[in-house]
Image: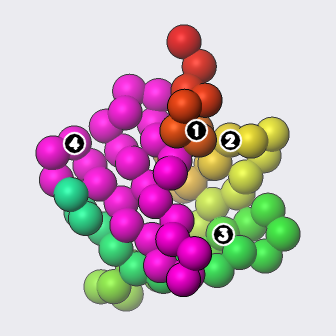
């Protein structure tokens, strides 16, 4: 599970290549599939929208978002 520092956005990368992203109280706000190549992630939302992300130094940079592993959010 990856989360923003404020906990508003939570993105779960599932082992079957699917993702589920919650925003605030809105569960499953975005769902789709993802593929990983090295440290790079390509996302395809179920609506067809595409996005990318990169994991650097244990932080997920997903388009304009910065997400941390749950439990590792800086103070």
**Residue that appears at 78% across and 46% down:** 56
Q: Are marks 4 and 1 in contact (CB under 8 Å)?
A: no
Residue 73 image-quadrant placement: top right
Q: CA distance from mark 4 to mark 2?
A: 20 Å
Please say whether residue 66 is visible from this viewpoint: no
Earlier sequence position, callout 2 versus callout 3? 3
Is residue 5 covered in magenta?
yes
Q: CA distance from mark 4 to mark 3?
A: 23 Å
The answer to whether 60 is drawn above or below residue 29 in the figure is above
Q: Which mark is residue 41?
A: 3
Earlier sequence position, callout 4 versus callout 1? 4
Q: Which mark is residue 55?
A: none
* Tag 2 secondary structure: strand
Q: Which residue is mark 4?
A: 24
* Tag 3 secondary structure: strand
Q: Residues within 10 Å of mark 2 (few under 14, many from 20)?
A: some
**Residue that appears at 39% across and 48% down:** 10
Please say whether residue 22 is visible from this viewpoint: yes
Q: Are marks 1 and 2 in contact (CB under 8 Å)?
A: yes
Q: Are marks 4 and 3 in contact (CB under 8 Å)?
A: no
Q: Which mark is residue 68?
A: 1
Q: CA distance from mark 4 to mark 1?
A: 16 Å
Q: Which residue is mark 2?
A: 59
Segment colored magenta: 1-26
Q: Residues within 10 Å of mark 3 (few under 14, many from 20)?
A: some
Is residue 8 covered in magenta?
yes
Residue 28 image-quadrant placement: bottom left
Q: CA distance from mark 1 to mark 3?
A: 15 Å
Horizontal side of residue 19 vs 53, given as left or right: left
Q: Quadrant of the C terminus?
A: top right
Q: CA distance from mark 1 to mark 2?
A: 5 Å
The answer to whether 71 is drawn above or below residue 54 in the figure is above
């Amino acid at each position: 599970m990856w989360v923003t520092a404020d906990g508003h956005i939570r993105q779960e990368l599932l082992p079957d290549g699917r993702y589920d992203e919650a925003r605030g109280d809105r569960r499953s706000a975005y769902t789709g599939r993802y593929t990983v190549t090295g440290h790079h992630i390509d996302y395809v939302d179920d609506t067809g929208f595409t996005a990318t992300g990169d994991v650097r130094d244990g932080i997920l940079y997903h388009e304009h978002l910065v997400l941390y592993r749950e439990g590792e959010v800086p103070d």
